[in-house]
Image (spheres, rainbow, N blue to C red):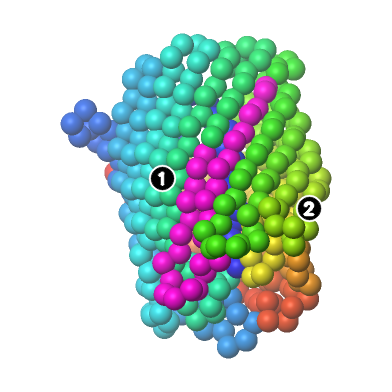
Amino acid sequence: MNRQNWLVLLVLSPFPLSAMAGKPQSIEVGGLQFTPTLEAGERYDDNVRALHEDAVSSWVTSLRPVFLLEAQTRKSAYQLEYAVHSETFHDHTDANHVDQQLALRSALEFDSRNRLKAELGYKRAEETTDTADPLKNDKYTLKNALLGYSFGVQSGMNQIDLSAEYQELRYRNSGTLNEDKEHDTQAFVATWYHRLGGRTRGLLELRRSDYDYVLPGSTRNSTGSAALIGLSRDVTAKTSGSLRVGYERKDFDSGSVSDHSSPMWEVGLAWKPRTYSTWELNLRKAFDEGDDGASTVHTTSTRLSWTHQWSGWISSKLDYQHAEREYLGLSRDDTLDSYGASLIYAVNRWAEVSLGYRRWHNDSNVVDERYTRNVYLLSFNLSL
């Protein structure tokens, strides 16, 4: 299993936690803004477990209600969000599961130079693909706490963002399945922004993360560090996003495991040649936590997507992803290609219908890790 790195290194977003244009309508409840939404879908998955052989196909019914409570003043903003995601596999009931996620977020602006952001989160979920046992879901809980501080006028020449995050990953599988992956993570990020002119800022960023595994004697205990420089461009510009390049190290506590170092980059850019058309490019090269016996997984990925609004009611999205994953400590290299297409019809302001298709093809020098998977999806998004 090569789940995305649990450690998401967050940089403070602009204060406050403002609503986006086109956001579903809310109602007032006791002085708070309450926003419920519902996503319901039916899909056909021809390889539920993403297996090389003996693939199991199934129709899947998905329901995901989300409940959001918000409060905002001139100097503060708060959010409480609760989501439930139920998936019923009609031809493979062993994969049925109900996920839950709870998040509490807050942002405070003390004055024009001092801002504070905090988040507490809890997730209880299951995964059906790339699992430790090909016949069982990976069942886990993830807890996280984040605190961030930002100093400097947002429109000024300089700004400093500091953040610290703690995450706790635990598995709920029976016996000893997945117990070698349970760990606690502490992460720290410091970013200095310097305005170069107009909407562009240069940046210097330092990161550190400590991974402490629960299993006694684990050789995966490690420290990750990275130094990056780059540019960021305001979202109001025709071309927006950020670019970070630098170098990272992965140092293991155990002398029996080799340390690793490598160039690193993260790119997230959006280009809007027209107000109704957006191209997005995401590039990443970094170390992820080890899996399937690997000490760490070195991932290089590219994602390109195009979203176009054809009319006031119809839009489309195309995307392509390519990822190369090197499992260090093992003789395994994977290349994953994925592409998808969807057509969205806005029935009215509070309801839309989406018809989509996605295909995954994983090639590997380990035969059993090769697979092809196709998913056909019809979904409905409802709000007030």
Instruction: Tell me which amino acid carries mark 2.
Output: His
Q: Nearer the viewer, residue 164 or 134?
A: 164
Q: Residues within 10 Å of mark 1 (few under 14, many from 20)?
A: some
Q: Which mark is residue 260?
A: 2
Residue 84, percent from left and from top: 34, 56
Above or below — where is 5 with respect to 218? above
C-alpha separation, residue under disc 2 versus residue under disc 1: 31 Å
Give the magenta range.
165-193
Quadrant for the N terminus in the image = bottom right
Which of these two is toward me, 158 or 47? 158
Is 114 above or below relative to 236? above
Q: Amino acid at mark 1?
A: Gly
Residue 208 in the image, given as x and y percentages of width and height? 65, 39
For the residue pair 305 and 159, the one nearer the viewer reads as 159
Q: Residues within 10 Å of mark 2 (few under 14, many from 20)?
A: some
Q: Secondary structure at mark 1?
A: strand
Tag 1 residue: 121
The reply to whether residue 341 is in sight is no
Q: Residue at x 63, y 29 (%)?
A: 190
- Image coords of residue 116 (percent x, y): 47, 24
